[in-house]
Image (tube, rainbow, N blue to C red):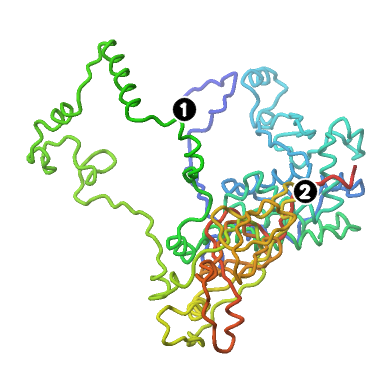
Amino acid sequence: MGIPTAVLKKRYEEDECKTNAKRRPAIVYRPKTNAAGRRKEWWEQWEEGEDRRVTNGNLSGSPIDNLIRAADDFKAGRTWPTQLGVEYLWDQFRRYVGLPVVPVSQKTSKPAPDDREELLDDGDISDNDIDEPMASAIVSGNGFIVEGGDGLENSLPQNHTEEGTPTDSDEVMSKEKEEQLLFFLGDPERAMKIFLSSHMRSEGLIWSDRNLIAMPRLLSFFFNFLLRNNVFPESSGFHRSLAVIDLARKELPLTSQIAKALPDNFSEACMECWGKKTDVFRPPPPTMQEENSEFELDADQTEELAKEFEDDLKASSVQVLDNDVIQEDTTTGITDESLDTGVEDNSWHDWRNSDALGNSTTESANWDFPQPRFLMALMGPTGFPITHTTGVVERSVRRVKSITPPPNAMDKPPFTRDNVPNPDPDSVEFGLEQRFTKVVMEPWANWDATNDLMPQILEASRGPVAEDEACPDVPGNALDGGLKAHNPHKDDITVFMEPLAAEVLCSGMGIGGTWVQLVRSHDIDKGDAPAAEGEGASEMALQRFWYLEELMMTLPSYYTTTESQFSNMI
């Protein structure tokens, strides 16, 4: 352009050519989609080319060294979703197993300002040297040395030399983490059962549906990576661990679905009919009131104490008014006109027709309260509340043994007792079997090895209960009747559930909650029950059904606790 210019002594980062400038194209992120146009999940993206991923290091060292190297190679070179918490779940697994968690150092693409000026003053430094990342070494608290900007590919345990020879590992790895690694390598199947059940519960990882889906899928990729690269050729436990992970992919999401589906409408309708049977506050029994009767005051003592209290108030210059004066003052000036809610200058407006800021709205606020469930809405006109009542109330953890859906067609009840004014309990129970799914729940003894949790019979329970030596505190409220005593430690129970709610159940999974028995009224009233007639009547007369009033927890079928986790190494 013919304009004289001078070359500056120093070059700065923002210096660039201002002539023939071209607009840089905007970078638009477009997520990968499948053939149907749906956005691919992260595990679908990982599956592309997963069979070609191999380890980069030498796996001729000890099992612990091979596991550490394989875990590093598994993480390197993958696209980890940043907003779905997958990398956080991977770190949780590494901590549980005992692997060091490598913190990702922030990449330094430019030197510090002071160092930058010193480099520019040196004439031997070229311009390209400025853009190169500065070498750095960060020693993490878990024993890893992270070199360079990213450092993940070149990271080595601190107890290794550059040749891969391990040094004294006791100086850098705690005894606890070493035991965790040995336990995982010795029994990976049990380690995965614990991690995907009780450990996830204790760490709070089960309260997110995203974690329940992502965790088993993440571990499935890792264990397939170990097996594909033959990291542990002599161990068959990793094949069994993969079977546990596949089971977790199915059952972990079901634990959340079951918790949302139960108690179902039938259970809520039964609770609405017969009341809540779980432990609630009850007034003290009459015996306690009789024991405290000596502290009650008669009329003379009450009047004397009231006069003393009034004298104390007057001595403190407090005006004491009679009840008649108070009632007269509070009602003075109140007229029908002042009670009119349609006054326009009411600064508070009508709270029913106001929004959150106090502004009036034309439509009234819609307060949605839970609508009660009624048996009539589920079963139509029925004598169920008359023929049946509640019996034993048990709080325990049981597992699904079998699931029997209702028949497709409504058959005519085989038992009819004409000329009897009261409803027939056999016909009522047959109607229940035609409408609802029967789920057989078996006791789950020692489901939690860390606590001695035994089944409990609650105070609202009615009916015979078998006295078991393992549970000596069972209330002795058994009735003298023909009903078989219920043993909470050995007997199976048959629970009625809505077919839609029972669809999420899976055989072997555990449900902890309060189970309420449905017995016939004559079982509790000790009355003479009318003899059932017809084919199959005697078998149905011996059956008693249950419903779930309160759900406390849902457990996968492989639920395992951490008791004696390291006993094989002591």
Q: Is residue 91 visible?
A: yes
Check contact, mark 2 vs mark 1: CB within 8 A.
no
Nearest the eye: 382 or 125? 382
2 or 1: mark nearer the eye: 2
Residue drawn at (50%, 50%) of the image = 28
Q: Is residue 135 above or below residue 309?
A: below
Residue 300 horizontal side relative to residue 291, left or right = left
Residue 316, given in percent of the width and then of the height, sits at: 29, 11
The answer to whether residue 69 is left or right of residue 335 is right
Q: Describe residue 407's horizontal placement relative to residue 316 as left or right.
A: right
- Mark 1: which secondary structure? loop
Q: Quadrant of residue 516?
A: bottom right
Q: Between residue 542 and residue 101, name the one nearer to us.
A: 542
Q: Secondary structure at mark 2?
A: helix
- Looking at the figure, which quarter contains the C terminus? top right
Which numbered dot is residue 2? 1
Residue type (three-letter) at the residue carrying disc 1: Gly
Crowding around mark 2 (Cα neighbors within 10 Å: few <14, some 14 to 19, many 20+) is some
Number of other residues with Cα within 10 Å of mark 1, as a class: few under 14, some 14 to 19, many 20 or more: few
> Which three-letter amino acid code belongs to the residue tagged 2?
Asp
Q: Which mark is residue 73?
A: 2
The earlier-in-sequence mark between 2 and 1 is 1
